[in-house]
Amino acid sequence: MNTDIYLGYAGVLLPYDVGTETGTGAISVAPPKLAFSGPLAELLTSFDSVSIVLATWWTLRYGRKATVDALPESLSCRVVDDVFSECLCKFPGTHQIPDRTKLTVESIRRRRNAHWLVLDHTACRWPVQVLHRALLLHPAMGLCSPQALEHLRSVLTRLT
C-alpha cells in the first residue's frame, strides 16, 4: 500500500524564512535551494511505496514544474500530485489566496489513501483532524534534525 507524504517545503526542506529577501520580507524571485532535501531523499530509499503530494506555496509562486525541479531526482520522481492542482486561483494574480491546509484536507479526501502523513513546520496551523498524522518540525531546523528524521522513519515504518 502506498503512503502519501503531504510535503511542505519551508520549515521542512529549508529554514522557514529562507524564501524571503533579507530585511524586506519580500518573496524571492527564484526558488531557494532546498538545503535539507538530502536527508529526506536518503531516508526514503528504504521506503519504495512512499509518494509525495506537494503541499507548498511554491507551486503557486514558482509553478509546479519549478517546484518539482527544485527537488533531487530521487524525490521528484515520487511526486504524484499537489494540493493546488484542483484550485483555479493563481498567485499573485488574486487577492484571495487559497487556504493550503484546507486544500490539503480536501486532497486527502479526494485521493482516498488510508496511509498518509503531513510533513510541515510547527508555525503552520493544521486542523484537528490532521494533527494525528502530522509531523510538525522546528521551522528553522526542518529535516536537518536527526530526531525529526528518526521520528519520520518510525512513522513511515508503521504506515508502510
Image (cartoon, rainbow, N blue to C red):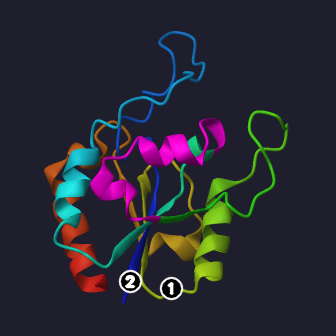
Residue 91: image location, x then y, percent: 74, 38
Asked if the magenta segment contains residue 75, the reply would be: yes
Q: Are marks 2 and 1 in contact (CB under 8 Å)?
A: yes
Residue interval drawn in magenta: 60-79
Q: Main secondary structure of the magenta part?
A: helix
Between residues 60 and 69, which one lies in front from this camera angle? Answer: 69
Q: Quadrant of the C terminus?
A: bottom left
- Classify residue 46 as left or right of residue 80: left
Under circle 1, the secondary element is loop
Residue 3: image location, x then y, percent: 38, 79
In space, the residues marked 2 and 1 are separated at their CA atoms by 8 Å
Q: Quadrant of the N terminus?
A: bottom left
Q: Specify whether residue 9 is in view.
A: no
Q: Amino acid at mark 2?
A: Asn
Instruction: Look at 20% across and 50% down and name the residue there.
Output: 39
Instruction: Look at 18% across and 66% down and name the residue there.
Output: 45
Instruction: Look at 58% across and 24% down and name the residue there.
Output: 27
Q: Which residue is mark 2?
A: 2
Q: Amino acid at mark 1?
A: Asn
- Classify residue 120 as left or right of residue 112: left
Under circle 2, the secondary element is loop
- Classify residue 14 as left or right of residue 152: right
Neighbours of disc 2 within 10 Å: few (<14), some (14-19), many (20+): some
Q: Which residue is mark 1?
A: 113
Q: Is residue 124 above or below residue 23?
A: below
